Image (cartoon, rainbow, N blue to C red):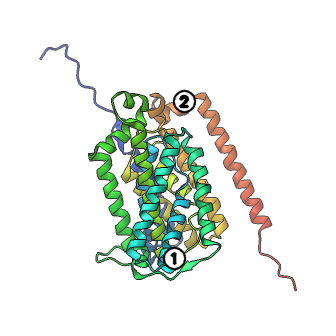
Amino acid sequence: MASSETAIEQPSFSEKIEPYISFLGPMAMILAIILFMGVAEPARYFRVSNMTQILLDAALYMPMAMAMTFVITQRGIDLSIGSVAALSSIIMAFLIKQYGFPAWSAALIALCLGALMGLINGLVITKFKVPDLIGTLAMDLVYRGFALVIAKGLVLARFPDLITEIGRGQSLVFLPTPVVIGLITLAIGYFMLKSTHFGRYTISIGSNPEASEMTGIAVDRHRVYAYVLMGTMAALAGIMLTGKLNAIQATSAPYFNLHVIAAVVVGGTSLFGGRASIVGSLAGVLLLSMMINALVTLRIEFFWQSVASGVVIILSVALYTWLQKKDRDGSGGLAAALSNPDNRKLLKMTVWIMGALIVLSIISLILGGPANPSG
């Protein structure tokens, strides 16, 4: 070989771990929770029953996290999944309780209704050119309104064994049935993302929708496909929630959208499109479920659980958005972000916001102390 031939430049350590940072981040947070709870409440937190409960809580979000990964990768968002889950489950419940439908057929109809609602979302976005955020938020109000009209304030309970088996049953393997269902949906999503045209087109559309359309990809059609998948998985989650509680009402699943979107983004799927991680979405779902369970184990009041969950979600999403800066503008990720004066100002603002939240927490603790019962 000629002596003038340039040697192949070896990638740096940061470049080597770049493809895995989306997975390593939530895993590091999970490890931090494990270590903290190992000191604070090892006996209660690491019981087999509690570990099973964490998996059951996470399983509810696994199907939706899989589908939301495709939606967000295509630069979309779906804020209607809680209402889709509630409406499809309410209709399933009425079919079973009032019209005598077999459980399997009512559940199948619920899945089809979820797909139909996802189709409507996709058409609103692609044909009427309504932005994803506004379109799905508006449809969230529509679907929730339909659920309230149909249910009329009723709580429907006591369902056949098939429904409760889906929500909290024990499969033939060592995992509960809903966990098996959730893992199967994630495995299907992983295969679709890595080995099908739909997965490759999803990445391409998220990276550059204009270029994808010029290469012959039916961008609008594939975006609709993603929303149909999202609606179907939201309906499946609604069925799982109904079986888990053995009850359903129109106001169920109010925070599905925030929890699922946070889990997917924390897991490394870029809000700016073109980057997806099904494994990361699984890690994100487990992280949030473990965090909420840890707060319960520490006997922290429900309202403080909401405060802590919101803060952790904001910090996690902000961190990963920062790390994904390289995907947006070609800069050097976190190091380049820290060297940018504007980003340093943003960091200072973040510190001020966190300080203000700490002050509010202290004030709340002082004002919300033990109440004096009146004699």
Q: Position of residue 63 (x, y in %)?
A: 41, 60
Residue at left 49%, top 43%? 76
Establish if 314 lies above or below 184: above
Q: Can residue 156 be seen here? A: yes
Tag 1, which secondary structure? helix
Residue at left 31%, top 75%? 174
Find residue 339 and name its label. Answer: 2
Q: Residues within 10 Å of mark 1 (few under 14, many from 20)?
A: some
What amino acid is found at the position of numbered circle 1 in the picture?
Leu
What amino acid is found at the position of numbered circle 2 in the picture?
Ser
Q: Can residue 266 be seen here? A: no
Establish if 334 lies above or below 301: above
Q: Quadrant of residue 374?
A: bottom right
First reached walking from the N terminus: tag 1 or tag 2: 1
Tag 2, which secondary structure? helix
The residue that disc 1 covers is: 245
Establish if 94 lies above or below 112: below
Label 1 with label 2: CB-CB less than 8 Å: no
Q: Foreground: 267 or 319? A: 267
